[in-house]
Amino acid sequence: VEADGYRVLVDCGFAYREMVKRLTLLEVEPESIDALLLTHEHGDHIRGAAQFHKNWNTALWMSQGTLQASGFSPSARVQGFDPDQARFSIGSFQIQPFSVSHDSRQPCQYRLSSNGLNLVVLTDLGTVSPQVLYQLRDLDGLILETNHDEQMLSDGPYPWPLKQRVRSDQGHLSNRQAAEILSQINNQRLQHLLAAHISEKNNSPEKARQALQQQAPELAQRTQLLQQHSVSPWFDLHL
Ligand SMILES: [Zn+2]
Ligand SMILES: [Zn+2]
């Protein structure tokens, strides 16, 4: 996410080399990133973070629980916070972490504001609490988990305990749950809705899109699906 020449990266789940390859496609030098905001310690969110920090001394921000679970040593450039208390700035960004329910030590997601524009990244959560919905007010951009289609998950190849984990209150949002969120928030100024964390085994882009469009047809032109094997273009938010 970029604003006024400052750049932050939310999570770093690819290995460092792959991350740099992808950033290069967007004409971003890794050393130009001011901070990584980490959501939780699962590998698909932090895999490349340690190397990133080692190479460029990039600041790392995460919850205390994520800090402990991921094994980073706290320092001036590695900060742990309490997601329900913290609010901090990086350049022109105001950053509001907030707790989510997911099966890791102390997971959070982020609301980023700059120059009157608001963006929320919301993946890896099991349930949508009133506290989460509160963070989704007045959004200009939303990156929203549409992890699985409930039927495909049931019929799919995952072993039973993993199926139960994914659909539990500490798991991942289904297409239906993601769509429900859209009916509970004010979408009026939303410029981009990006569907993310889409399962390759338990979902299809068509099903994710269908579910979102059914609930919020007015957002059809503003919705994009993010894919794990390709790099999306930049999405611009304007006042
Ligand atoms: Zn996770
Ligand atoms: Zn994840």
Image: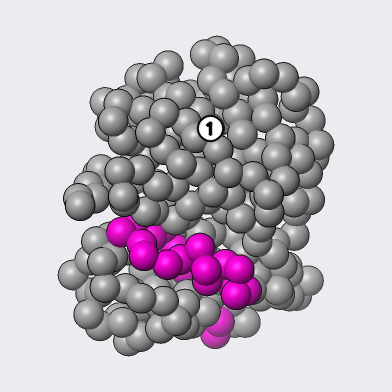
Is 19 placed left or right of 40 in the picture? left
Q: Is residue 189 magenta?
A: no
112 above or below 15? below
Determine whether the residue tagged by mark 1 lies in a helix, strand or loop: strand
Q: Nearer the viewer, residue 130 or 145?
A: 130
Q: Nearer the viewer, residue 193 or 224?
A: 193
Q: Residue at x 52, y 71 (%)?
A: 133
Is 216 placed left or right of 110 in the picture? left
Quadrant for the N terminus, please. top left
Q: Position of residue 26 (x, y in %)?
A: 28, 32
68 above or below 163? above
Q: Position of residue 102 (x, y in %)?
A: 70, 61
Q: Position of residue 91 (x, y in %)?
A: 41, 28
Q: Residue at x 20, y 50 (%)?
A: 238
What kind of residue is marked 1? Leu
Residue 79 visible in the displayed image: yes
Residue 14 visible in the displayed image: no
Q: Residue at x 50, y 28 (%)?
A: 35
Q: Residue at x 61, y 55 (%)?
A: 98
Q: Position of residue 171 (x, y in %)?
A: 67, 67
Is 192 placed left or right of 67 in the picture? left
Q: Nearer the viewer, residue 7 or 222?
A: 7
Q: Which residues are magenta?
A: 128-152
Which residue is identified by label 1?
Answer: 36
